[in-house]
Structures are given as structure tokens and as C-alpha cells.
């Protein structure tokens, strides 16, 4: 039975696989232009605030710096992540809010300059989103909570949210990332970046093209960078990021070249695991995920999901269950919805129908309407047929 459910579930998993790793950062960073137009506040959604004409010139962050107190206080928290050495940020950084040790209560992403904002309370049933109610909810749930920016190869400082922040000082102190000299692996590679000034120039140009969503231009510049310096690990990795949209074989080759140049570079392992999952090469997926976790034991929600998926397909049910639970604990926003589906499958494999159904039904509360949701409904119906008592 679990094999039938698992095969059915695979079509849903492909939809939110490796491609989201490229698309999500681009969509998130492209919102920066929308902020400047006053149409999208950080965190998504449509703004209902009437903004002054100066928003067109000052952008979102400039507007918030001069916004009336009733707009800011209690309704938003904002801050910045600063990376020591100021490397070019090609991807948004994850900021994690925790109110108890070992648990993420909310995650958000930075923009291209490291800025982030918290504009909602991550509760199952928030009673309203109006300013006064949001202020009350933030005070009830976020006072005393801490913010960090976990990143492989770096130490993150911690910023604690105080009552003063929630009342009248919504701008938080900087979260500072400093290199960890004893780290086994890292999320940003510096291997090869200083050996060829021409390669670095092409790399910097590609970064500008990337931010302006000129993907063809960025791809051409990155190809030039790796031709000039075949040991430029970060350039190989980012080239693979662009190739994965249309040619996973070429992308895999680029990721492997990045690892040849820098075997401790974590992100290429993650992408290779994702490609292997798409191709249903479960053994390779498991090996790549394990290699990434050896370098970055904390991992990310997506990495733990890949590990869970591979282990489940390889018959390592208990290991898969643990990995799926870890992924879910790191992902309160349900950015990786398939993790809970894998958890349900591991429960079905040991005939725990009621718990499996609870998780399958819960996924319907956050998966958008469409093929994915319809697949979950079919899974639920299948399980209910196997154990009618589980319908209660």
C-alpha cells in the first residue's frame, strides 16, 4: 500500500523540486522593484497603506524610515543581515525567528542588500491583520524571541525582540555573519575568485545581470568567467543554477565542476541531490544529501526534505521520518510542503493510518488549489479505504 501512495506522491514532489531553488530567490528579489512602487510590502501580499508621493523616489525602506508612527509601531519589525567581507549576495538569506530553543516559529528572506522585514504573526488562526490587532499579536507572541540567520560556514549573531521594538523602535540591530574557521563546509565559496581579474570582472557583471533578471546575459557572463578561471567554484555553481532551468545534464556537470574546485562547497551537493530526485535516482540522491549534511550538519529544510525523500525510497523508513520531521521543524511557513507528505508516507509504511491522515489533511490547509491538492485528496481517499476507522 505505501508503495502505491509513494508513487502517486512523486508527481506532486516534482512540482516543487529543484526549480524553486532558482525561481524563489529571483521572485523574492524582484519584489524589491515592487516595493519601490509601493505595491508589495515585505512578506508578500498587496499593500493597503496609502503612501506619500515620495515612495516613488525613496522606495520601501526609505518610506518606512519616515512613515507615521501608527503605520510602523507594532505592525512591522525590520532589520538587516550583514555578512563579514561583504561578498556579493546572489541568493536571499534566511532569517529565522525562534521563541524556544530548536524550533523555528517564523522564517523570512532578505532582499539583495540583506534587508528583511517581519509583517505578520505566524499563527494558524490570526484573528485579524489590522494594525492594532497585529501589534497585540506581535507583543503576545514575539517579545523575547530571537532572530538569527543560519548559513553554512558562518557564525550568526542573535537579535532579541524587546517590548521597546514592538512599541516604538521597530528597526532591530544588525544580524552579523562571520566566517567559522572550524566549519566543515560553507555556503559561499571563495575558491578561485582571486586568481583571474578578468574572470572576477565577468562574474561581477553576471551578478548585475542576475539582479536585473537578464538570465541569458548572466549565463553568458558566467560561462566566460569559468573559461577564464576553471577553478572558480562559485561561478560554476551559479552557472549550474541557470542551466538547471532548461538542461539538468549541463547543470549537473557545472555543479560537479564546482565541487572539483571546492569539495567543501555545500550548495552544489544540494542541487545534485535535487536533480537525482527528479530523475528518481534515489541512491545518488541519498549520497549527495548525506555529503551535504556531513559538511553542514544543521542543514536546511530543503536539504532535510531531500534526505527524507531519498531514505524513504531506499526503504530507510525511520531515518526518512526523522528527516521529514526535521525539515518541517525548520519550515513553519511550509515553503517545502512535500516534507509533510513524506512524513505521512513513512507513517503509512508502518500502518499508522490516523497520524498519516492527520498530516495529509493538514497539507490541504496550505497547499494551493490545483493538481497537488487533488493528489493529496486522492491519497486521503485511498488511506480511508484501507482503514475506514481512520475516517473519524
Image: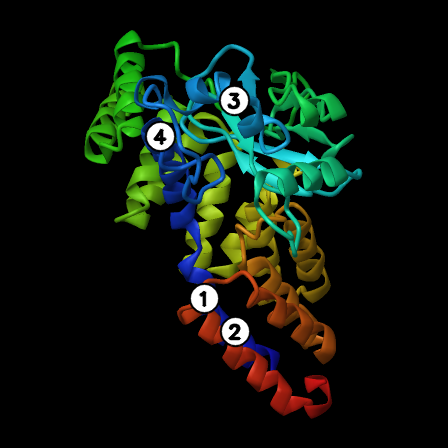
Marks 2 and 1: CB-CB under 8 Å? yes
Residue 227 occupies quadrant: top left
The image shows residue 341, relative to residue 302, as above or below, that is below
Tell me what residue is drawn at x 73 percent, y 63 percent.
Answer: 318
Residue at numbered disc 3: 68
* Nearer-N-terminus badge (1/3): 1
Check residue 376 in the rendering and tell me which mark sits there, or answer none.
2
Marks 1 and 4: CB-CB under 8 Å? no
**Residue 310 in sight in this render:** no
* Nearer-N-terminus badge (1/4): 1
Tell me what residue is drawn at x 60 percent, y 39 percent.
Answer: 107
- Distance of label 4 from label 2 (alpha carbons): 37 Å
Name the one closer to the observer, 43 or 83: 43
Q: Nearer the viewer, mark 4 or mark 2?
A: 2
* Nearer-N-terminus badge (2/1): 1
* Nearer-N-terminus badge (2/3): 3
* Nearer-N-terminus badge (3/4): 3
Q: Residues within 10 Å of mark 1 (few under 14, many from 20)?
A: some
**Whole-percent x and y of residue 113?**
44, 20
Q: Quadrant of the N terminus?
A: bottom right
Numbered disc 4: secondary structure: helix
Q: Nearer the viewer, mark 2 or mark 3?
A: 3
Residue at numbered disc 4: 236
Amino acid at each position: 500500500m505505501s508503495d502505491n501512495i509513494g508513487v502517486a506522491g512523486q508527481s506532486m514532489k516534482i512540482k516543487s523540486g529543484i526549480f524553486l531553488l532558482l525561481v524563489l530567490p529571483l521572485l523574492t528579489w524582484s519584489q524589491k522593484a515592487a516595493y519601490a512602487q509601493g505595491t508589495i510590502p515585505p512578506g508578500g501580499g498587496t499593500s493597503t497603506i496609502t503612501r506619500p508621493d515620495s515612495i516613488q523616489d525613496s522606495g520601501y525602506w526609505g518610506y518606512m524610515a519616515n512613515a507615521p508612527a501608527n503605520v510602523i509601531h507594532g505592525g512591522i519589525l525590520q532589520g538587516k543581515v550583514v555578512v563579514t567581507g561583504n561578498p556579493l549576495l546572489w541568493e536571499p538569506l534566511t532569517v529565522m525567528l525562534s521563541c524556544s530553543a530548536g524550533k523555528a516559529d517564523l522564517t523570512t528572506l532578505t532582499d539583495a542588500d540583506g534587508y528583511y522585514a517581519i509583517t505578520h504573526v505566524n499563527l494558524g488562526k490570526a484573528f485579524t491583520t489590522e494594525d492594532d490587532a497585529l501589534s497585540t499579536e506581535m507583543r503576545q507572541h514575539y517579545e523575547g524571541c530571537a532572530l538569527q540567520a543560519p548559513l553554512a560556514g558562518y557564525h550568526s549573531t542573535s537579535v532579541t525582540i524587546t517590548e521597546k521594538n514592538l512599541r516604538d523602535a521597530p528597526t532591530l540591530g544588525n544580524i552579523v555573519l562571520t566566517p567559522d574557521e572550524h566549519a566543515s563546509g560553507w555556503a559561499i565559496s571563495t575558491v578561485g575568485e582571486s586568481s583571474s581579474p578578468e574572470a572576477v570582472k565577468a562574474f561581477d557583471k553576471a551578478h548585475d545581470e542576475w539582479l536585473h533578471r537578464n538570465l541569458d546575459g548572466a549565463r553568458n557572463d558566467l560561462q566566460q568567467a569559468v573559461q577564464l578561471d576553471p577553478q572558480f567554484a562559485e561561478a560554476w555553481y551559479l552557472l549550474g543554477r541557470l542551466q538547471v532551468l532548461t538542461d539538468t545534464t549541463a547543470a549537473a556537470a557545472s555543479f560537479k565542476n564546482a565541487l572539483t574546485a571546492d569539495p567543501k562547497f555545500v550548495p552544489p551537493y544540494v542541487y545534485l541531490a535535487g536533480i537525482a530526485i527528479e530523475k528518481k535516482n534515489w541512491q545518488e540522491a541519498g549520497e549527495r544529501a548525506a555529503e551535504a549534511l556531513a559538511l553542514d550538519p544543521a542543514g536546511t529544510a530543503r536539504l532535510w526534505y531531500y534526505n527524507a525523500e531519498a531514505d524513504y525510497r531506499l526503504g530507510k523508513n525511520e531515518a526518512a521520518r526523522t528527516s521529514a520531521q526535521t525539515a518541517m521543524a525548520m519550515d513553519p511557513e511550509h515553503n517545502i510542503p512535500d516534507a509533510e507528505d513524506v512524513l505521512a508516507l513513512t507513517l503509512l509504511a508502518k500502518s499508522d493510518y490516523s497520524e498519516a491522515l492527520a498530516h495529509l489533511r493538514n497539507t490541504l490547509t496550505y497547499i494551493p488549489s490545483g493538481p497537488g491538492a487533488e493528489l493529496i485528496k486522492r491519497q486521503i481517499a485511498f488511506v480511508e479505504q484501507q482503514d475506514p476507522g481512520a475516517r473519524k
